Amino acid sequence: MSAICIRSLLLIVLMVHSGIAQQGNEKTLSTRVSQKRLLSSVRELVAIGPRMGGTPSGDKSVRYLVQRLKTLGLSVEVVEEPAKLMFINHAWSLRVDQPRGLRNLIKREWLGGFSPSVPPSRSQLELWPLPEDVPDDSIRGKAFLLETPISSKAYLRLVEHGATCLLLGSPYLDGAYSDWAYITDLMPSERNAIPLFNLSFNNALTLKKTLEEGVPVVMSFSSKVTIAPGAPRTIVATLKGASDKYYIVCAHGDSDSGGPGADDNASGVAGVLELAHVLNGMVRSGHLPKPAFTLKFIIWGSEIYSTEHYVRTHQETLENILGVLNYDEIGTGVSRNCIYFESNDVEHNEKLLRTLEGVGEEFVGKKGFWDEATTNPSQGGTDSYVFLPHWLARLDLPEVEIPSVTVFTGAWNELKTLPQTEGWSSKAWQGHPDSVVVDYSAYYHSSLDIPSRTTEKEPFNMVWAVKAVGIALLRLAW
Ligand SMILES: [Zn+2]
């Protein structure tokens, strides 16, 4: 046997050996991901409150998360960001006083963000589908039932002429918000004068029919809030690699709607915690060597706002970021058991997304893994976008091409069908190859985005998201 032959043989043996070791690591990672721990993380986060950055519940969740990450032995840094106007909802009440038969109607409604504090009050309810049409002299002392969100101009006019409060019905989207409220806010301001209450679709309809029948409706209500500047805090936990170049695994830590936010986004935060737990645990127990590249586990204090602060403060070293893997809503999905990897229309995401797609295709249908997996085009609206060149340009930062993706199992509040990006039809996708049907959450940004309706109903979603990103990182960072 020639020296060249022996060398080739050795190389093959080494490759087979590392392939087997890789498979072993992926199996170990998969068996270590704990559904029980993921679910309990979500429950504990939701119990803290809406966790909005710069509010007491946001700070409390930061303390909880720092403690969890430090217990793992990771080095943890907390970054305080510039203050912004925050809304803290301490207490509120809303009730139908008359007719008496409707006194127990209000159950799962929600006070709109940036509503002011008002003392216990009573007002007759008026129905004006278009608040712009209400004559000036019919406003004083009245509460108004709205069917669509109000413009700032119409709000100011109602306030100026003495309206006392607003009630807004939820949209009815394929069953979403029938008996729970879609949460909308007033404009962020310390000067809003009357509160906004978000009603479920059915309750708004009941009140509307009652008024249309000519039966007077009287509401009683109150609210106690704080509107003041507060500084969001972002947590960065580092698993040091041989190189300072790094991957980010992240999720926004606030509920962003101001509601309970179990799926959006305690599920994502739980995913980051779990991945940190499992990967760091495998390194500490000697199952894995130190990674070739550093991993940073980041929980953003306030969606987008904190991410923008991060890229601004790291503008000199953005090229050190090898990739961003962002979790947003990995806890539920109405119509498919699919895991999605976004954005495949961004060319420099190719390598990162092909790795995720490969994992998606290799494990689809296996016990403990997803029924379907696919990449999908950009939809916008979450933290991964802040790392993309067009967003960096908007912030006057260098347009570095950072691969940046979001992993989710359901987005928005209704099904959306998007044309698939050419060349990205996945073998793990069961639908039409030229399109992607994006699954949704019936509890998106609502008063009932609580564990029992989302994460506990389909507990496998978070497990899948952690396994998919974990296996991809074993292939990319070790
Ligand atoms: Zn979100």
Image: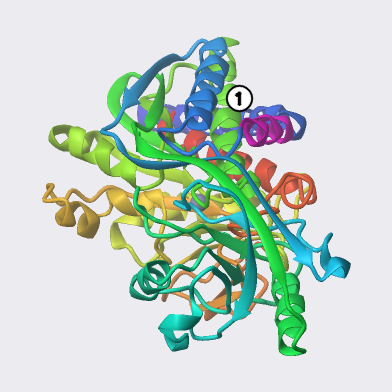
Q: Along the line of sight, which residue is nearer the eye, 120 or 320?
A: 120
Q: Is residue 471 visible?
A: yes
Q: Is mark 1 within 8 Å of ligand 1?
A: no
Helix, strand or loop at label 1? It is helix
Amino acid bearing label 1? Val
Q: Is residue 61 left or right of residue 367?
A: left
Which residue position holds label 1? 278
The x, y position of residue 21, in whole percent, is 59, 27
For the point 67% across and 72% down, the residue is: 430
The x, y position of residue 217, in whole percent, is 72, 73
Magenta stretch, main secondary structure, is: helix
Residue 32, by quadrant, is top right
Q: Along the line of sight, which residue is nearer the eye, 74 or 97?
A: 97
For the point 39% across and 25% down, the residue is: 236
The x, y position of residue 240, in whole percent, is 38, 18
Q: Is residue 310 above or below residue 168?
A: above
Q: Is residue 224 above or below residue 135?
A: above
State which region is magenta. Answer: 38-48
Q: Along the line of sight, which residue is nearer the eye, 138 or 267?
A: 138
**Magenta stretch containing residue 7, yes or no?**
no
